Image (tube, helix red, strand yellow):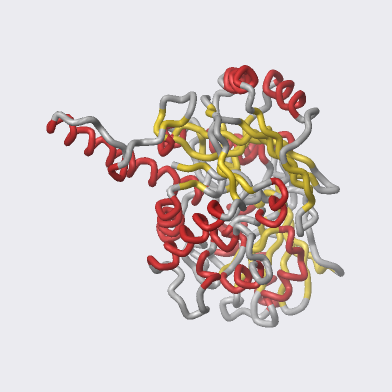
Amino acid sequence: MDIYPFAAVRPAREVAAQVAALPYDVFDRAEAARAVEGRPLSFLNIDRPETQFSPEQDMYAPEVYAKARELFDARLADGTFVEEDSPCFYLYRLATDAAEQTGIVACCRLDDYVDGVVKRHENTREDKELDRIRHIDALDAQTGPIFLTYRGNGRVDRLVRRTTLCAPLYDFEDAEGVHQTVWRISEPDEVEALAQAFAQVPCAYIADGHHRAASAVKVGLARRAAAEREASAAEAAGEAGTGAGGETATALPGAGLPAYETVLSVLFPARELTVLPYNRVVADRAGLSPEELVAAVEQAGFVAERAERPVEPEERGVFGLFAGGEWWRLSLGGKLTDEALAADPVEALDASILQRRVLGPILGIEDPRLEARISFVGGIRGTAELERRAGADGCAFTLHATSVDELMLVADAGLLMPPKSTWFEPKLRSGLLIHRI
């Protein structure tokens, strides 16, 4: 697949650590408001512009998105952000005590998302897409990169390793204890070498950011259609064509493409990624006592054993259940085999098994994407958060983490996982590299 360099808008080196922020969608509204307190340069102020208003403000009102653009322009004007004068690739490393991953920050073709060269594994919700569509349109920029993964390539690996021996552009530890390092690849021959090496990679997979991807694609397609209409009108009038929005279209350097024809992405080799469990909490037990819930789960084919401590499954086919202040270990009595997974990669997922046997028939959660009674808790928050959310009246389930191999099997089959099947950690930071469209 093709990747393209771009002239990034990025923070000045001395303020990069203050700007870098967790993705907009890991916060609820109250958490986002607290996160920006005392942090005026945090990109979350721009990513979640409702934080600049009172809690009663409609967070999807036009003036909220206008505020995002106002803040973005102000940070450009005061030198917080600078803009590259030539197209570059970047390498982006996130490192913790437990893991390290290094990805290529680049632009991917819009049509690779549309045509399935970039493969997805989850559905999206239109209301969530609309928020990011408005945000991208307001800023005329993609601010949140799409987290992609790919099967490793030796030539790409060698070029990446060589670059990481050089001095970095950014190198700091953020407030969450994640070490952030960014290298810039700006020499034309090095840019071309990496682009040619990555052309040997046949496809990539969306690991995280399905809503960001869908929104960026829809904005790009809308701007393509607008440019085509304007070009047709200009041709009919015998005038020169213009870009989307009536202005000369910005071409992505080296690609011969308008910038809106590409999507800001970070591409990591699959072997480096860490996936944590994505657990479930249901606000009630559908009228069942804890004992009745356990009995119903046993009737659904599970072996239930009382546990003295929180259950964090270490293999497929094992689940934890918290109800009535107690933990239970649930198992299916045998491992799910790789053959079964390959035969039906969606139905064999633990998230599918839990939905099919417990959440739907016992607790009445027919569509977890739409049901307000269920919430999802990424594994980094731990079992104490599950217990807190479940309280006395609800219940919680822990799952074994879905693997990257399972994700790719599902995507290769053209199928979709249940919602909230994967939680990748660490999360990409927003605000470090921005793509104007």
Q: Residue at x 60, y 63 (%)?
A: 358
| Residue 410 seen in the current view | no
How far across and down, in percent of the image, does residue 185 sit?
66, 28
Q: Residue at x 76, y 54 (%)?
A: 174
How far across and down, in percent of the image, does residue 154 sit?
71, 20
State whether residue 116 is above or below residue 72: above
How far across and down, in percent of the image, does residue 347 sit?
57, 46
Query: Does 301 sit left or right of 108 as displayed?
Result: right
Q: Residue at x 32, y 41 (%)?
A: 247
* Residue nearest the observer in this picture, 62 or 77: 77
State whether residue 341 is above or below residue 314: above
Query: Does 125 sit left or right of 88 as displayed?
Result: left
Furthest-front residue in this view: 78
Query: Does 428 sit left or right of 53 as displayed?
Result: right
| Residue 240 seen in the current view | yes
Q: Residue at x 76, y 23 (%)?
A: 162
Q: What is the number of callouts on the image?
A: 0
* Residue nearest the observer in this picture, 254 or 153: 254
State whether residue 162 is above or below residue 53: above
* Residue nearest the observer in this picture, 241 or 59: 241
In terms of image quadrants, where is residue 202? top right
* Residue nearest the observer in this picture, 217 or 307: 217
Q: Quadrant of the C terminus?
A: top left
How far across and down, in percent of the image, does residue 346 sit?
56, 44
